[in-house]
Image (cartoon, rainbow, N blue to C red):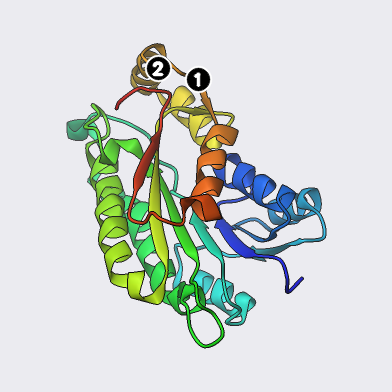
Amino acid sequence: MADRPLHVVTGSTSGIGRATARLLAADGAEVVVVGRTGERVEETVAELGPAASGVVADLLRPEGITALADALADRPLDGLVLSHGGDQVPGIFTASDPDRFAYLAEAMFLTNARLCHRLLPSLSAGPGRTEGGRIVVVTSDAGRAPTVGEAVIGAFAAANLMFVRTLAREVARQRVRVHAVGVSLTEDTESYDRVMGASDFSRRLFEKAAARMPFGPVRAADVAATVVHLLGPDSAPTTGQVVSVNGGLTT
């Protein structure tokens, strides 16, 4: 499979990550599925076919990141899609649990920074490789547009956006391109089910958001199509871009 582009997709056993992995595999890429549960990783790999492989890793733990890096064995990467994100639930800041802030920082932002740091050598151009790979970070659009109920979520999403824009400038010399995709209410995802069932507040918040989407509803496949575009040759002239896939909720 050496002639196939190699893409790693985190959080790829469900939702946006799985939809992205499907599109990449359908385009003929070799896809590395990454998830925390062995059964779900195996199921996804079986669906994608012989060009897919799986890594079971908890990316919130250092040993999970090491397991992923070791599985790749320093092979040149064409794409790294970071779509894991953690179990975010909207809520008013004054009623939130501050003990969860550290978890959200780790799940939403620090894992992305650590993975990029660890895998950048595999994405960079070098001897025999004139072009590097692409990184796409999937994060909450609350990092770009202030959203009631998402003060902390929005803060860490905003950290992702500035990280992407700054990293893009730094790694351009290695011919690596870096982008972010901002998402809001996205159907057929576990986060949708979690948010809609968490509380009356979160359900009403996102029902109102859905009603304001002139081009909604948004589904996982819609986001995946944008991610795959940013990984492909048609986006070659761009880097450091933040693309919102939110059904027109904000512009």
Which residue lies most toward the left here?
94
For label 1, count other residues whose C-alpha is less than 10 Å away and answer few (under 14), some (14-19) or many (20+): some
On the rendered structure, is 74 left or right of 89?
right
Quarter of image, res 77:
bottom right
For label 2, count other residues whose C-alpha is less than 10 Å away and answer few (under 14), some (14-19) or many (20+): some
Give me the residue at 24% from left, 54% from top: 162
Residue 28 percent coordinates (x, y)? 73, 55
Residue 41 percent coordinates (x, y)? 69, 55
Residue 71 percent coordinates (x, y)? 63, 76
Q: Amino acid at mark 2?
A: Met
According to the picture, the residue beneath numbered tag 2 turns out to be 213
On the rendered structure, is 68 left or right of 62?
right
Q: How many callouts does the rendering have?
A: 2
- Determine the secondary structure under disc 2: loop
Quarter of image, res 183:
top left
Give me the residue at 23% from left, 45% from top: 155
Give me the residue at 46% from left, 76% from top: 124
Quarter of image, res 34:
bottom right
According to the picture, the residue beneath numbered tag 1 turns out to be 217
Q: Nearer the viewer, residue 124 or 63?
A: 124
CB atoms of marks 1 and 2 within 8 Å: yes
